[in-house]
Amino acid sequence: TAHDDDFMEPPVRSTSLPVKYVAPVSRCTPVSISSIVKDFNDEKKRLVIEMKFDGILKLPEITNSQEFSHNLLSRVSTEEIAIRMGDGTLLHFTDGDVHKVLGIPFSGKELRIPSTEEVSHIKNVICIRLNVPEFKKITRSVVTDILSKKHEAPMSDDEVAAFKTAFILLVMTKFLAPQTLLDNI
């Protein structure tokens, strides 16, 4: 379309600006997910669909371009919930649009800040499900080993719980809300 060139001239990135003015850098690594998901069998795909994350199954196996990420993230306006195009027009998006693109559920309960006790309880549940002694021992390799495990027969209830937990941890830490590029969760 006529607007395809809107992303061709990225904003100038300047390292001489104070730190608070440096454009955001994405830690999102979709290839961390797509490279694992592509090998899911039908049972694992069904579990992902059951969790309402079916869009992740179609995520292309791409590596993240830092220049593209910089360009795109520098154009997102959280106040206007839109992407500012090269000519200044706004491309608004909604939670429904995010659902269409990523297959992520966008309805349900409001998120609230959990108490310290709730966080501790959830961490314990995660450790039990993943069969790990303590939360700080959960690494990307623990998660990917669970997701990549080949099952000869249908998965047991414990294996299903471990798979779903590992899947959510991977999607959150490497795609939806990445906090670090380190191996820890």
Image (tube, helix red, strand yellow):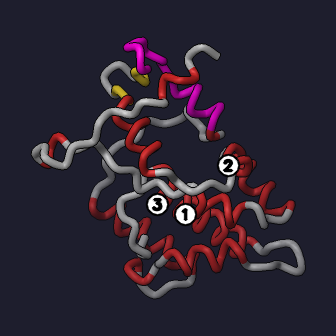
The residue type indicated by label 3 comes to Thr
The residue type indicated by label 2 comes to Leu
Q: Which mark is residue 170?
A: 1
Looking at the image, is mark 2 or mark 1 earlier in the sequence? 2
Give the secondary structure at mark 2: loop
How busy is the neighbourhood of tag 3: few (under 14 within 10 Å), some, or many (20 plus)?
many
Position of residue 168 measured from the top left corner of the image (x, y, whole percent): 56, 59
Residues under labels 3 and 2: Cα distance? 16 Å
Does the magenta run of residues contain 88?
A: yes
Is 152 rendered above or below residue 24? Answer: below
Residues under labels 2 and 1: Cα distance? 14 Å
Picture quarter with the C terminus: bottom left
Q: Which mark is residue 59?
A: 2
Picture quarter containing residue 33?
bottom right
Q: Which residues are magenta?
A: 85-101
Q: Which residue is mark 3?
A: 173
Position of residue 50 measured from the top left corner of the image (x, y, whole percent): 74, 49
Give the secondary structure at mark 1: helix
